[in-house]
Each structure stands twice: as C-alpha cells, then as structure tokens.
Image (cartoon, rainbow, N blue to C red):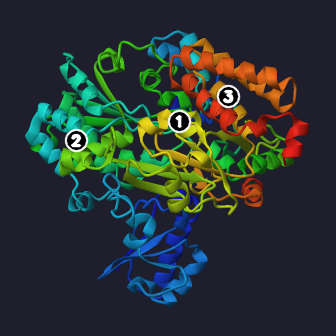
Amino acid sequence: MKIFVPRDMAAVAVGADRVAAAIEAEARARNIPVSIVRNGSRGLFWLEPLVEVTTASGRIGYGPLSEADVPSLFEQRFFDGAPHPKCLGHVDKIPFLARQARFTFGRAGVIDPLSLDDYRHHGGFKGLESALSLGGVGIIAAVKESGLRGRGGAGFPTGIKWETVARTPASQKYIVCNADEGDSGTFADRLIMEADPFMLIEGMTIAGIGVGATKGYIYLRSEYPFAIRMMQQAIGIARHAGYLGASIDGSGAAFDIEVRVGAGAYVCGEETSLLDSLEGKRGQVRAKPPLPAIRGLFGRPTVINNTITLASVSFIMAEGAKAYAEIGYGRSRGTMPVQLAGNVKFGGLFECAFGVTLGELVNDIGGGTHSGRPVRAVQAGGPLGAYFPPALFDTPYDYEAFAKKDGLIGHGGLVVFDDTVDMAKMARFAMKFCAIESCGKCTPCRIGAVRGTETFDKIIAGIEPERNLALVRDLCETMKFGSLCALGGFTPYPVLSALDHFPEDFATPPLRHAAE
Amino acid sequence: MLHAIQEEFGYIPREAEPVIAEALNLSRAEVHGVITFYHDFRREPAGRHVLKICRAEACQSMGSEANAHRLLERLGLDWGGTTADGRITIEAVYCLGLCATAPSALLDGEPVGRLDAASLESLAMEAA
C-alpha cells in the first residue's frame, strides 16, 4: 500500500523526514508491507507534515503529524483510511483546497515529483505535444490569447515578450527562468520546483520552441537547496527520456536546460541584474533599453520569465488559451497562486481566479491571525509591497485595483501581522533591507536607503519627527522616480503605506505611549 | 566556480582570487568585486556549524527578531559572528520560502520551522 509523506522543504522543516522514518520502522516492526512515496506538498502548510493514504474513495489525509502519532495511526489502521484524531478526511474536500482553481498547481502534492509516469498520467506533456504541432507562431498566438501576464510581479503580457524575442533575428536565443524567489511570504516557485518540476521543464521547452531558443537556464536561489536538488534530478530524468536534448520527444527540435545557483543577493531577482549574475558578474542592474528580449543573456535575445509564468504555459497549451482566459478579473486573466504567510492561521498556497477580495483571502481563507489577535496589517507583494490596513480589505485581487490603492500584487505573497506590530519598525526595515540589498549602481537606492534608515532612527527616537517625516516623504519621491529598478523604486511602497495608513505609530514617544 | 570553492574550503580564501583571475582571464579586481557582491560568499572560515536565521517580514510577524536577539546575546555574537570555540556561526538570511511555517532557520542546510525562543536556542546550543 502507498503512503504519501511530503519531501517538501517546509514539510521537512516541521518534521516530515522523522515521520517518514517512523512510519517505515513501525511498518517493519508490524510486518506490514508499505511503500512510502515522497510527494511534494499540497501547499496546506499549517497541516504539515500531512500524510496521505490511497483508498477506493480517494486520498485520505492525516495531519499535522509528529513521529509520536505513528504507533496510534498503525493501531487504528490508518493505511485503510480509518478514523483517527488527526484524520482530515478526503484531502480534496478540505475547504481550503476545494475552494481553489488549481490550474498550475493541480499536480502539486498529488504526484511523485520525479516520476515521469505520474506526470504523464496526470496530463503532463500534453501542452508540449500541442506546442510541437502548433509551431512557434501558433504557440505565441495561444499565449497572447490566454492573457497571461508575468507572474514575477511586473505583470507584463507574456505573449508580447515572446513575440519580440521571436521577431529578433539571432543565431542563438535563450530562455531564462527567474527562480530567484526572494520576496518574503512567497513560496510558489519553490512549490512548483519541488512538487512538479517537469511542469517547469515543459513550460520552458514550449517557450524555446515558441521563440526559436535552444538553451534554457534556471536561475535558482541558493536559499532553496531542496529545489536545486530536485530540478537537477528532474532535468537529468527528462534528458534521459528524450524530453530534453537534440530532438525533443523525437520532433527534431533541440532544447536543453541548465540550473545556475544564485548566491544570496535579493536584487538578482530583478531581470537585468539576474542576467549579469548568470554571466558570472556582480548582479548589477542594467539600464533599459535595450530590453532583454532584444539584447539579453550574453547580448542575445532572451525570454526571461518567472517560474510561475513558464509553468502556467504548460496548462495553457494543454487545456487551451480559452480555458485560462475565461476566468479572472478585468485585465488580470487566469489564476494567481496567492501565498498566505506570516502570522496567519491557515498558511499556504491558494490558487484562485483574480477578483477575490483581500479581506476574503486574509480572513475567510486564511482564517485571520495565527496568534488569534486582530489583523492589523497585511503586506502584499513582498518587501517592496505596500502594507494594507483592514480598511482596504475590499480591494479586489487584481493588478490594476491594487495599483489604484498604491500597492502591488507582486509575486502573490501576503504576509499577515497582528496588532502587536510596530509599523515604524517595519518602515525602517523596508529602508534597511533596500540598503543591504542595493546593487549600488544608482544613487537614489544606494544612498537614499541608507539615509532613509538613519532618518527613521531619528523619528523612532523622537528627534524632530515632523521635519524628518517630511524628509522621508521627499526621499521616497526621489527613490520612486530616480531609481533604475524596482528595488529602489518600490521601497517607497511599504514605507509610504505605513506612514499613510498607520500614522499613530510614527508619533513622538510620549504620544505613542498615550495612544497605547 | 565560487560556490565550488566555498563548498571545498568553507570560505573563499584571499589567495584564491589571483588564481581564479588567471584561470578566467579576468582582472583580480573583477574577481574580488564578484566575491564581495554576494552575501553567500564568506571571506573568513565559518564555525563547524552554520545556523542561518530568517530575518524577513513573514518570520518577523511571528516574533523571529526577538528570538534571534536573545540567542545572539546568549552567545555574545553579532550577525555573521562565530563563537570563540569555532563551534557555530550565526548568519542572517532573507527568506527561505518557509513563510507559512515561520519563524524558520537553516542549520547546516537542514530546514527547521515553527521555531520559538526556546527551540531556536536549543537548536543552536545542541549543535556540537
């Protein structure tokens, strides 16, 4: 009988390896033959380690487990799907999962990530087949029709980017996958690579055929050791099976992928600095134009897309552009994997159509805070995203709607804070983070972030707060309009949103004391 | 290449710079520039164990900063510091992607989540 125990980094962080070992030992002691499949995570992280068994009526889950639960699980015959205090019933029916539209994450946690048979059995390579029969022009038309926009944060239409690369003549073109998922509160790229790595390989291959590129790179951050191992193994398996190499699936088209590991620089998630880093240099931002689509990696036309974007292409090509474009909100078509993180009761990945409100995501789906205290702020879109107060919870999850509220969706992360948060500290942190991670190329970011941190130190110490707050606002203007990339340009989002929505945290110390 | 050197030696020795420059036909300044740009590359040997504690927002929302400061105080270290006996180095990391099981850390490459002040401390103190 099959027992699924996730090998996902977050599941292992909370003891999945120990649970797997305990199940194996217990089964041996009781002489019960079991085969343990190390699947990826379903993304229901508050239930990890989440162990699943197959029954005639579907998969039954148990969690969150520790090794201490294992003897009683065997006692109750959990392998037959029997009741147990930790039994969650059918995993597909857990409301958090049942309410999702799992387009891109449909296989996550279901399959053995390194089994090509599992992948094919669950619709894998259907997109590649259709891409091979459509050819470059057809692929780009389909991606355009789907309305897919870059999921890294900028939201640029993917089809147009691909078309630019396809139309730029060159002897060599590249596909680069941006897997430098550095935003706090995000883990969707990690989940794709650890739970369904062939989907990314398939998406990159489709991109290669689409624009006429034969070589792909995955720029993967060093903070993700599990994803690095998984991608390297999956690429080896795909190559061995003829899905990568000189003739993909016998089509005559060539494409291959290499993993390149980052070295802890947040700014390398910015596309041009990523390209410099990939070339072995300091990860410094390049001025645009020229666009990477015209002169990218090693000066050649390059498609550089986020991991989710490339993975979504597999679904679009398999199920059709219409199926993807049909759902969504305004100009944001398809689904977004929203990542609920931080001080949240039900933390995990929630893939849904655009248009759901921020409040529904945080309160209904996320269940409010983990601490049980009131939600005070939600940072949307990573360290460069705005802090939203509950008063703005009616904002629909959509690129344009968030922009109208001076915020951004970014890479889909939502970090929840309870009422113990000190927003002056968070605003200072945003500046400090920018100072630590600045690539140093442009002045507003390199110097501005350092001066911004110092100014916040004065504000927090109660030194001329009014004058210094005005100075910070002025500095934010300069950073917003004068920076070369989003690091300096977007740091004002968390800073200004903290100032605008939580002014009471920036009052002088005696006042703050009175307010408490 | 730099990753491989750090893997082998635990840090990137200064003496390696001219050797790399020669092999890649670069100036020594260029090599030095790359090494010092990235947070991952160490210029000094680390302790026998390396504990990377996440300092990003999601972990902060679950109290990571207070836990980390308590630990650093107990060890008498600052971020990036190594204990006098060379037992452990404490480094900051900005996001491990374990944001729904925060606060998290990485001890010698092994992830640990849902840490509190006590479990973080025992993690750091018990690594022999």
User: Would residue A382 be visible to someone looking at this image?
Assistant: yes
Q: Nearer the viewer, mark 1 or mark 2?
A: 1
Residue A327 is situated, as x and y percent measured from the top left of the image, at 29, 50
Residue A257 is situated, as x and y percent measured from the top left of the image, at 30, 36
Q: Nearer the viewer, mark 2 or mark 3?
A: 3
In the rendered structure, the answer to whether residue A508 lies left or right of residue A359 reads: right
Q: Which residue is mark 3?
A: A431
Sooner in the amino-acid sequence: mark 2 or mark 3: 2
The residue type indicated by label 3 comes to Met
Cα–Cα span, label 3 and label 1:
21 Å
**Helix, strand or loop status at disc 3:** helix
The quarter of the displayed image where residue B50 is located? top right
- Nearer the observer, A117 or A338: A338
Q: Residue at x 53, y 38 (%)?
A: A182
Q: Nearer the viewer, mark 3 or mark 1?
A: 1
- Alpha-carbon neighbours of circle 3 within 10 Å: few (<14), some, or many (≥20)? many
Question: Which mark, by number, is residue A405?
Answer: 1
Which quadrant is the C terminus of chain B positioned in?
A: bottom right
Q: Residue at x 20, y 17 (%)?
A: A171
- Nearer the observer, A5 or A190: A190
Residue A381 is situated, as x and y percent measured from the top left of the image, at 52, 40
Sooner in the amino-acid sequence: mark 3 or mark 1: 1
User: Would residue A219 be visible to someone looking at this image?
Assistant: no
Which residue is the extreme one toward the right? A510
Indicate the chain on which mark 3 is placed: A
Q: Which residue is mark 2?
A: A244
